[in-house]
Amino acid sequence: MLRIEEEEFDSADMITPTYDYLLVFASILVSLMASFTGLTLTKGISALPEGRRKVQIVMASLALGGGIWSMHFVAILAMRFPLPIDYDALYTLGSALIAILMAGIALLTMHFAPRTWLCQIIAGTILGNGIVVMHYVGMSAIRGCLPLYDPTGVALAILGATIMGIVAIGVAYAKRDTAHILASTIIFGSSVVVVHFVAIAWTSFQPTGSIAGFTPRIENGTLALIVMFSAFVICGTFLLSSTNYVFTLFPVAPGSGAPEPAFAGSGVDTRSFLEEAPAIALPQSEMLRIPYERDKRTHFIPAEQVIALRAEGHYTVLYTLQEKLFCPWSISEAEKRLPVSLFLRTHRSYLVNMHQVTAFERHKDSGSCHFDGAQSLKFVPVSRGNVAGVREALGL
């Protein structure tokens, strides 16, 4: 594909680029905004139907992968070379696809495979090394000078990306709340920046002769426009995501005249419905129904058909014998609404229907409730402080 005219260079010909520090700062902001947006989009998707879950993962992957790519090329544009530079279109666009693909694989692992510590390590390793692969493929796009990589820098980039990727995934999925999302944003956003500049610090640049080839080139100015558009999209989605967090942290008081935020995609003002519900006098049989969202509608399921509820941020996942459903109640609200004679808190993240438990297993200082025959959920943990209450409820 490429033919390089023969020309001799020695170490004296090495190029030392300078930096536009305003663009360096912009690259850091892009990385943090993309990380926050992508990780926020993963919140609550485990409870969605499989089709919607995949769509949400695609959106989160575009944010994370696109953010990694945008950060890289904003930082590359911040480098000032003393000779004309352009970029190979195949490598430039291919590096973006690689970043998005590896981010998608990591998120699919977390939301479709059992969420174990091994699963988190695999997902974190894939996500972290997506930064490394994207970086070196993106560096290979540079035309006009030749990047030369020190093996030490490559090893440090891989090690740092792997560790920070695993830590970011571990923090993000330890508890799906605002604090953990923000902490994982800082960790992962920082990892993209650190990996890039560590790798660059161990990279030297050598001028090359004229290069002929069939692959289209992207000029420096054109690349700047592409990256600016990508950063603009990331900023827009970041603003939308952060606005949702503001409404979550500072909800509008009822009767203030401002509309209550409706649950995304449901078409129903779920919070208003839930706030009004306690004031309605319903028969006991009607009160023992739990709402869930599907196909932009709010449906209801008899409480006795639910085997357990699991906290998912400000919402919960309902488990029946065959499937799991998205419930707009928080775990605390579900605990208040459901009778203690039927549902018991076994763990900070779980409410269990004691009538559906088929087996109880005692561990060293904790335990687990099992549901034989259930396809959606095999067992739930029982924390040490709740073992006594669970055993008493089960008649043990």
Image: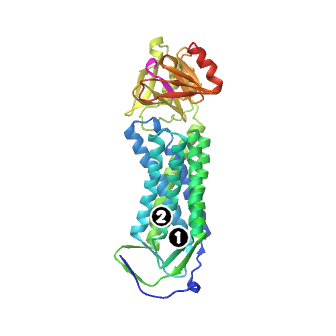
Q: Report the colour scheme.
A: rainbow
- Residue at the location (43% across, 70% down)? 222
Residue type beneath disc 1: Leu
Asked whether residue 298 appears in the rendered view, the answer is: yes
Query: Could you tell which of marks 2 and 1 lies nearer the N-terminus?
Result: 1
Residue nearest the observer in this picture, 375 or 172:
375
According to the image, label 1 marks what residue?
A: 77
Say if 293 sits above or below 164 in the image: above
* Percent coordinates x, y for residue 219 in the rendering: 43, 74
Per the rendering, the mark at residue 65 is none
Q: Which residues are magenta?
A: 303-309
- SS category of the residue bearing label 1: helix
Say if 187 sits above or below 339 in the image: below
* Percent coordinates x, y for residue 321 in the rendering: 41, 24
Tell me the crowding category of disc 1: few under 14, some 14 to 19, or many 20 or more residues within 10 angstroms, Cα based: many
Per the rendering, the mark at residue 227 is 2
- SS category of the residue bearing label 2: helix
Mark 2 and mark 1: span between their CA atoms? 9 Å
Residue nearest the observer in this picture, 234 or 311:
311
Say if 347 sits above or below 172 in the image: above
**The magenta stretch spans residue 304:** yes
Q: CB atoms at circles 2 and 1 under 8 Å apart? A: yes
Residue type beneath disc 2: Val
Tell me the crowding category of disc 2: few under 14, some 14 to 19, or many 20 or more residues within 10 angstroms, Cα based: many
On-image quarter of the N terminus: bottom left
- Residue at the location (54% across, 34% down)? 314
**The magenta stretch spans residue 322:** no
* Percent coordinates x, y for residue 117 in the rendering: 55, 42
Residue 174 occupies which quadrant of the picture?
Answer: top right
Asked whether residue 357 appears in the rendered view, the answer is: no
